[in-house]
DNA sequence: TTCTGGCACTCTGCCTTCCAGAGTGCCAAG
DNA sequence: CTTGGCACTCTGGAAGGCAGAGTGCCAGAA
């Protein structure tokens, strides 16, 4: 499937390389690296020069490929487990592959339809996240992680005040991402219905559509609009609201596909344990996703991951959100030896559709 | 540690056996089984007659033990991996061990204090459950599962309807446990403010204070109170509400300690995959805990578990709750070769303390 | 220069063989 | 019923051998 593209691709690579002035990596050497990565990802076995020439028509002999391999090894892109074994890409090799040799593989039309269909059935935010994470795990056959839309980046869709008792008010905050937060407010005295209605409508006018962090500023002057006798109540409600807003708390995370870890590799128990441990720590996962760039897809390969337990895994993550704003991150965690183009394609597609779903609801 | 108890225990066993008329299992044979289970759990290796006599002072020769072992094997309590290997307890053997040979090992005072201290820091329900599950995983070094307190007994605190768009209504349900659920309702036509207000107040009168499962019955006649033209809208809202109520009854579950699976055994990847798969399925876990008896601890050993993937695991579970009522279940999942007395002790202790915490809050 | 075929060399992975050790079942005697 | 003795079986690990795959290097060709 790659032969058809090779001519164009090579030229493209050559151009890019020239731009970047990377001398020692000529066109063919990069093709060799790409072939190694592809083969290794497919077979999970070190790949040798002969097999490489057979499977990819590189147009040169094994001996030549061997020379290129030696050069690639010198530069640290590939590595030999033992003398006289095939080569395996290093983290640096994967990095180069991802940066310049691979293109995100778009989902096929049926796949896109399936994603759409699967996510469309969701009834609420929890369900959206749950479906997303499972879908992602299934598509990539890896461990999927989805962060709940964070409060700090979303906007106010609605605020509701409900009198539960003479001096008790329930404050409900609904964000554009579908998240609902509620707080019970103990008021200093009985609250009149009319005051409550007034406050409610003023809150709505002042806050709806605003990003959460901006709301306190916008409502600062509010108590002044009320009778002095009502101000304590208004202040308490406002304080509670601000508190709720400020608690951009508990970034929650959902996980799926841990069973896919069993396909990790041969030296399996050694690799899997730290990974499972990492996955149990919400903090680690949050930091992991936190490292994701705000725009564009982030790929962290092997040792590029801060957390040691994930040194033999790669993390592909991306922000998602309604509209252009990214409100949270999602991603997958798999062995460094993963199908990067496919994984990146799946992650990107899923993120896009979740964003749409969120925007619609 | 067992020798000190052996005299009393043996008599007790003998008595119990007489009561149950199990002839072929005399006192010593049971002691042998107990020793086998203990040793196997400790070493993870098939245990032979000689080693058994050396480690436990059974007061007889290896040859005698061999005879007993042969008998135990005939009865299906133990099993030989290969001719001329030691013996391994079967599920049936563990069952007998748990039923009659083991006693729940109480936690030590420092352990109890640690449990108490660890759980006391919890700030809300989520936190209680999260702490509990982690604690349990740590104590038992196995996979822990905690079910959220059942909501079927909680009541409606408030229902709110908010018009977001001409034909879109946000339905918010708040329970007395502080849980908030919201749904977006697509109405068949434009909804008038007055209709909405009317519906809202009727919902409140009919539902507030009622246990969730009773709400549908109480609101059955509601559409009849409205103009025929409004009934479709009312019906849609009601349907959504009932759906939400029903979903509230779907219990949630929290999980921890999956990393402990790596200590499962030698034939590791084969065993662990189905287990991980099972753990991902909330449904499976819920069914698993659902099988727990309402009172007392339940131990399901190996093939006693309905779910096939858990055929080589044992599940120790127990109900917990505030006061005498069990509101939910918790438990651990581990290899059939687990320390039953210790695990049961930990599970029981944790359940007890969680109950107390819930009662206090 | 750059590529290529050839060649000697090295290493793994796998298979076989072999042996010690642990464990058993059975039997005859206490 | 228990026990010591004995012959037998089976695993697990060590040692050795062999085929296959892969490499590096070199000298000659393009």
Image (cartoon, coloured by chain):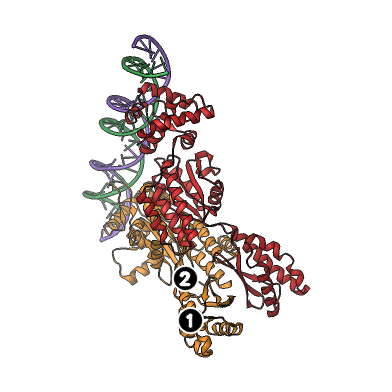
Chain colours: A orange, B red, C purple, D green
Q: Residue at x 39, y 36 (%)?
A: B38
Most distant residue in the right direction: B228
Q: Whole-percent x and y of residue B288? A: 54, 48
Nearer to me, A146 or C27: C27
Residue A168 vs B291, above or below: the answer is below
Q: CA distance from mark 1 to mark 2?
A: 16 Å
Can residue A271 be seen in this snapshot? no
Nearer to me, B74 or D18: B74
Q: Which residue is mark 1?
A: A215
Chain letter for mark 2, please. A
Residue A290 left/right relative to B297? left
Q: Whole-percent x and y of residue B173? A: 60, 68
Q: Residue at x 74, y 66 (%)?
A: B221
Residue B53 left/right relative to A233? left
Q: Residue at x 46, y 52 (%)?
A: B352
Labels 1, 2: front one = 1
Label number found at residue A150:
2
Can residue B30 be seen in this snapshot? yes
């Amino acid at each position: 499937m790659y032969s058809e593209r090779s001519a164009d691709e090579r030229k493209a690579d050559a151009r890019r390389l020239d731009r970047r002035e990377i001398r020692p990596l000529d066109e063919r050497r990069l093709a060799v690296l790409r072939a190694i990565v592809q083969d290794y990802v497919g077979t999970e076995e070190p790949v040798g020069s002969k097999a490489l020439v057979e499977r990819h028509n590189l147009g040169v002999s094994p001996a030549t490929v061997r020379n290129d391999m030696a050069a690639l090894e010198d530069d640290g892109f590939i590595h030999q487990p033992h003398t006289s074994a095939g080569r395996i890409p290093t983290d640096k090799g994967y990095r180069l592959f991802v940066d310049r040799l691979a293109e995100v593989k778009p989902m096929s039309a049926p796949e896109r339809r399936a994603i759409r269909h699967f996510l469309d059935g969701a009834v609420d935010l929890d369900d959206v996240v749950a479906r997303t994470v499972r879908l992602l795990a299934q598509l990539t056959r890896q461990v999927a992680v989805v962060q709940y839309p964070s409060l700090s980046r979303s906007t106010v869709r609605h605020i509701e005040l409900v009198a539960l008792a003479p001096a008790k008010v329930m404050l409900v905050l609904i964000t554009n991402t579908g998240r609902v937060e509620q707080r019970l407010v103990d008021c200093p005295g009985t609250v009149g219905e009319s005051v409550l209605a007034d406050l409610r409508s003023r809150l709505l006018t002042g806050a709806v559509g605003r990003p959460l962090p901006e709301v306190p500023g916008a409502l600062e002057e509010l108590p002044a609009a009320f009778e002095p006798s009502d101000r304590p109540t208004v202040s308490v409600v406002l304080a509670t609201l601000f508190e709720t807003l400020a608690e951009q708390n508990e970034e929650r995370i959902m996980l799926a596909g841990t069973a896919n870890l069993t396909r990790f590799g041969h030296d399996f128990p050694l690799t899997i344990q730290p990974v499972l441990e990492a996955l149990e720590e919400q903090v680690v996962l949050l930091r992991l996703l936190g490292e994701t760039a705000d725009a564009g897809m982030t790929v962290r390969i092997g040792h590029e991951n801060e957390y040691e337990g994930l040194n033999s895994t790669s993390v592909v993550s991306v922000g998602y959100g309604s509209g252009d704003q990214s409100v949270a991150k999602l991603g997958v965690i798999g062995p460094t030896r993963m199908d990067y183009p496919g994984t990146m394609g799946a992650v990107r597609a899923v993120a896009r559709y979740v964003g749409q779903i969120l925007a619609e609801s």
